[in-house]
Image (spheres, helix red, strand yellow):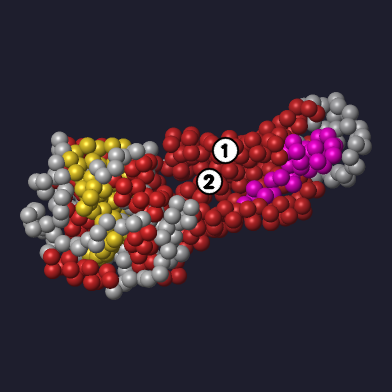
Amino acid sequence: MIEPHAPAPPGSAQSSDGPGGDAGCALPLPVRQGTGRFLVLAGVFVCAACGLVYELELVALATYLMGDSVTQASVVLSVMVFAMGIGSLAAKRLRRHAAAGFGAVEAALALVGGCSAMALYAVFAWTGDWGGMWASGPRALLVAFSLATGLLIGAEVPLLMELIQRIRRQDAGGAVADLSAADYVGALVGGLAFPFLLLPLLGQLTGALITGAVNAVVGGALVLGLFRQDLTRRARRTLVAANVCVLAVLGSAAVLADDFERAARHALYGSDIRVALRTDVQEVLLTGGRDGRPLNLFLDGRLRVGGRDELRYHEALVLPAMNGPHARVLVLGGGDGLAAREVLRHPGAHRVDVVELDAGVVRLARHDPALSALNAHSLDDPRVRVTTADAFDWLRGAPPAAYDVVVSDLPHPGITASTKLYSREFYGLARRVLAPGGRLVVHGGAVASRPRDFWTVDATLRAAGLRTAAYRVRGRQAGFAAGPDRVPVTARAHRDWGFVLAARHAPGPRLDPSGPRPRTLTDASLAADVRAAGRTRVRGLPPSTLVHPRYSG
């Protein structure tokens, strides 16, 4: 297919009077030598941008679909970098057929990288709850895509090095410098385009498909337009047909992406989806809430409000902390308004500050008929003030001794973005805003399945200068907000929640005798919940800090 060219020593001249008309050109080109080099480097730039988008897409899928953890992101990146090295070595065998090899690699990379998001989402949605041998199927497929993408990206550079040297021979150091510059600048553009352009405007599925199409067009055009004389007629036809097929697959998938996403959501959450939106922070879905069906709120695929059990959860979170002065209450998180609802049931609560990161969740809690009815329109109560901010940053500027009660209604600490909200530094800030005799209550996740995480929360609170009392409440149905993993609704979930009540003096989890009558708790059941949590205690755990998080993903 390719007419091989023996390498020439640096600085040697190779004469050729091709269409470019430049002395020293190793093969005939349809453009001048300088223009040819520019086009190759432009191709390197685009391919590098596409490659980094694929890489970031796989990392985003790992954290979004299978748990937001540094471990999973590290696995994807390390597998891909390893595969790039193997791909670079394997490409040495294709150097004699550099043009055809590069064209084939780009077509394959466009197909694999472009379809990776849709394929992984499909496997997770339709097979994620199979269990058995397929329990880790989506994770295994994620690693397989990382491996395949890394192999193909790694094969690009040796082939591009050969192609640019065929246009004009130069010393190896100069060629590497030119290619590296184009590659790194392209990676910068791709890295910035993914979070600021592709993800918000196109989403994960369509963004990956469009990137694959750009990759295929640029790779095919570079080979067929600039190095067509280096290919046989049969090779040119094969490459054209391959790229047309790849573009047809990617284009068809892009057209069907919305229908596919709706079908996958129905497979994950059932057919009763009322609201599905992407805020600036996360994906928000509401199911049920009509015709007597329980309302469920999902944040980034994790069930945060389960209609059948939310009352049990929120009473257990709020009511023990309200036994004592509670005129001024701070709720960290809780943008759904349900924790604020329980606080407002106490006549002595005169001011409630809610600090929620996601303004979209607050809007939904105020305006969705089912959710606003469930939270009793608590966020519209004149005693409630809602601030859209990061809880850690907000606490740094909060006045000292300003609150009698602080309610930390935040996601599980195993979610990477939440670990700072379960750190010693965070609890030190929370301790500073507590008035004398004030209490802090923290949701610490599932006790049964993640006891080390739960008791690390307890150890961290103690390290911040607080005394603690832990208790554990069981739910009647599959629990929500139990762990960091995103799992299909039909999968087995954990049925308990752990809470830690903390204060400067030893707290005792009891109900306020002058408060509203609980519907799911009694003093006797709360005492039993304290004993149940104590039986799971893991001793000797170090506290979690900003620079040394101790929670598992």
From where the camera sits, is residue 186 visible? yes
Which residue in the protein does label 1 denote?
A: 190
Residue 115 x/y as whole percent: 52, 47
| Residue 10 falls left or right of residue 387 | right
Q: Nearer the viewer, residue 397 or 550?
A: 397
Q: Residue at x 78, y 43 (%)?
A: 162
Q: CA distance from mark 2 to mark 1?
A: 9 Å
Q: Quadrant of residue 25?
A: top right
Tell me the magenta residue range.
150-179
From where the camera sits, is residue 334 visible? no
Q: Residue at x 71, y 40 (%)?
A: 180
| Helix, strand or loop status at disc 2 | helix
Give the prevailing secondary structure in the magenta stretch: helix
Q: Which mark is residue 345?
A: none
Q: Residue at x 28, y 51 (%)?
A: 408
* Label 1: how many Cα within 10 Å (few below 14, some 14–19, many 20+): many
Q: Residue at x 81, y 35 (%)?
A: 167
Residue 429 x/y as whole percent: 35, 47
Which residue in the protein does label 2 denote?
A: 56
Kind of residue at badge 1: Gly
Residue 36 x/y as whole percent: 76, 30
